[in-house]
Image: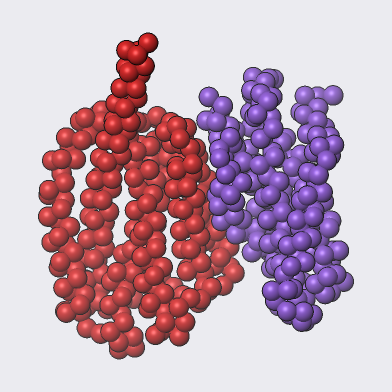
Amino acid sequence: MIMSLANPTRFLSLVSAVVPWLTALVVILLGTGLYLAFFVSPPDYQQGETVRIMYVHVPAAWLAMGCYLVIAIAALGTLIWRHPLADVAAKAAAPIGATFTFVALVTGSLWGKPMWGTYWVWDARLTSMLVLFLLYLGLIALWQAIEEPGRAGRAAAILALVGAINIPIIKFSVNWWNTLHQPASVLRVDGPSIDPALLTPLFVMGAAFAALFMLLHLLAMRTEILRRRVRALQQTQVEHAVLVGA
Amino acid sequence: MSPALALLVRDVKLAWREGGAIGVALGFYLVVVAIMPFGLGPDLNLLAHIAPGMLWVALLLAALLSADRIFHNDYEDGTLDVLATGPQSLPMVAAIKSLAHWLTTGIPLALMAPVLGLLLNLPLDAMPLLVLTMLAGTPAVSFVAAIGASLTLGLRRSGLLLALLVLPLYVPVLIFGVSTASMAIVGPGSPWPPFLMLCAISLASIVLAPLAAAAALRTAMR
């Protein structure tokens, strides 16, 4: 399956077939999720209405990390299997991941002002998200700095893997450094500590964000493939012009 | 002399005789620490409190300033291609060049820290431990900087890009380096657990970073 998609034309036709369905799925999930989050879910007894920020904040944070995982797996694909689309997948995922990280940071900060009394604290989770954001920026900057796409893809893949090894270490050291954020409350061994009335909208929003990521990712990959084709066409045209001129 | 040792001696000699390579890093270290009190005010108690952190941050910046030197000259004049086809594996070459960077940048910066600590009213009895943490932590700084240096080889504005890529990776080194010194000065608790973590990070960087740097060198040289 993955190997048969190494043919960009086959991949593009698959994208064209999937995009309308995926768009419909995103609209339905996001519509339902936002409706549940804003009108159905009750305000929290402590946090009041601000709890609704969570429905954007938490899925964005999940996707911010999931997106880096996608990049790391794609990096393996670039370096080990030389899969021609792996590099495209990683390059297309980086700005989306950076955006989700930014959304998580901004919504967290807006929630922090009424709850903690400050927009920013140097707490462990916030800080590791900020470091993740910086890693994304570094990846994007490296892609833009190297002109030759082949080298850019491999260099970014190496950096992505170095980052993937470092993220747990950074996470651990930052935890050791300072902890104020509430501990994980959804994925726990003894079950979630959130009330189901708040949990259902959260999961719908999580699914909506995941579908949104897939849609944006496929579209960005298609754009990147087309951009490379335009580049290749321009090069052949220039070469042709040079030959004719000579 | 074995090829590995010969390469190490050559790199150290080049850094030493190139003139300015070590001096500029030390001068940069001095000037960064010296301008901080102008921003923070001359309160000696405050300065003593934040001295370990300031010295560590300034050390990271000074080490990064000289990091693009690790491979740049050899890449420009073709020596790196000769080394890549030579008897040593490329990770070994990367490791030796990172080691040379540590010997010529990490150690001098660590040894200069107590002098700058005097400017910041760092307690005298904390200085041996501060130097020890810097000696233990700077191998990680040099070896990880080599990854950034190899990734940005031959690019425009490589120095700025190098800092953007590498500084986030220094967060653990900074955290454990500063906490060791702070624990020793103000407590609470023993300084040794963070110190051992710092040693672990350095050892892991020495083993893993040359592999990544060598892979990046191959992408730059093809």
Q: Residue at x 39, y 73 (%)?
A: A108
Of A78 and B203, the residue lying toward us: A78
| Image quarter hosting the N terminus of chain A | top left
Q: Is residue B66 left or right of residue B10?
A: left
Whether residue B17 is situated above or below residue B191 in the rendered picture: above
Question: What color was chain A assigned in the picture?
Answer: red
Q: Residue at x 75, y 56 (%)?
A: B28
Of B192 and A158, the residue lying toward us: A158
Can I make out residue B125 in this image?
A: no
Q: Position of residue A149 (x, y in %)?
A: 42, 33
Of B39 and B140, the residue lying toward us: B39
Quadrant of the image occupied by residue A54: bottom left
Q: Position of residue A179 (x, y in %)?
A: 53, 74
Can I make out residue A11 in this image?
A: yes
Quadrant of the image occupied by residue B194: bottom right
> Among all residues in the image, which is located at the extreme top?
A246
Report the chain shown in purple: B
Q: Is residue A122 left or right of residue B126?
A: left
Q: Position of residue B207 (x, y in %)?
A: 65, 41
Q: Is residue B43 left or right of residue A203?
A: right
Q: How many marks?
A: 0
Q: Residue at x 69, y 38 (%)?
A: B70
Q: Residue at x 19, y 40 (%)?
A: A15
Q: Position of residue B100 (x, y in %)?
A: 76, 39
